[in-house]
Amino acid sequence: MHNVYGYIIVMAAVTYLIRMLPLTLIRKDINSNFVKSFLYYVPYATLAAMTFPAILHASDDMRASIAGFAVALILAFRKKSLLTVAVCACAVVFVAELFLV
C-alpha cells in the first residue's frame, strides 16, 4: 500500500521550493529587457496553453468547437465585452452541433 500522505507532502515541498527559491536567490533588480518581457508574458502563454486544448475538445464535434473559437476570436479582436464573446461563442457551438449531427 502506498502512502498517499507522503506523496502529498513531497509534492507540497517541491511546489513550495519551486516558488520560494527564485524569491530568495534573486535579490537584485532585473535589468534585462528580454527577461522582463519574458516574465511578463509567461502567465498569458500558460493560460493559452491550458485553455486552447480544452476549447477544441469542449464539444462532441471538433468542427463546432473550431467555429465557436473563430467567433470568439473575431469578437475579441473587435473589442467586444467578455460576456458578449462567451455567449456568442457558446451559441455558435450549440447551433453548429445541431446542424452537424
Image (cartoon, rainbow, N blue to C red):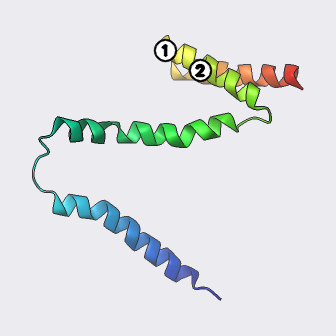
User: Pointer 2: what residue?
Assistant: 72
Compared across the picture, whether 68 is left or right of 50 comes to right
Q: Can residue 42 be seen from the camera position used here? A: yes
Q: Quadrant of residue 65?
A: top right
Q: Quadrant of residue 16?
A: bottom left
User: Pointer 1: what residue?
Assistant: 77
Residue drawn at 70 percent across, 37 percent down = 58
Which mark identifies residue 35?
A: none
Whichever of callouts 2 and 1 sits on the residue coming sooner in the sequence is 2
The type of residue carrying mark 1 is Phe
Residue drawn at 51 percent across, 14 percent down = 80
Q: Are marks 2 and 1 in contact (CB under 8 Å)?
A: no
- Locate residue 43, reporting x and y percent: 39, 41
The type of residue carrying mark 2 is Ala
Image quarter (top left, top right, bottom left or bottom right) of the C terminus = top right
Asked if 6 appears above or below 63 in the picture, the reply is below
- Locate residue 77, reporting x and y percent: 49, 14
Q: Can residue 87 be seen from the camera position used here? A: no
Mark 2 surroundings within 10 Å by alpha-carbon count, few (fewer than 14), some (14 through 19), many (20 or more): many
Asked if 73 appears above or below 78 in the picture, the reply is below
Compared across the picture, whether 67 is left or right of 43 comes to right
Asked if 85 appears above or below 2 in the picture, the reply is above
Residue drawn at 14 percent across, 45 percent down = 30
List the single residue furthest toward the bottom: 1
- Locate residue 49, reporting x and y percent: 51, 41
Image quarter (top left, top right, bottom left or bottom right) of the N terminus = bottom right
- Locate residue 100, reporting x and y percent: 86, 23
Please, what secondary structure does the residue beneath circle 2 have? Answer: helix
Real-space CA distance between mark 2 and mark 1, rounded to the nearest whole angstrom: 9 Å
List the single residue furthest toward the right: 101
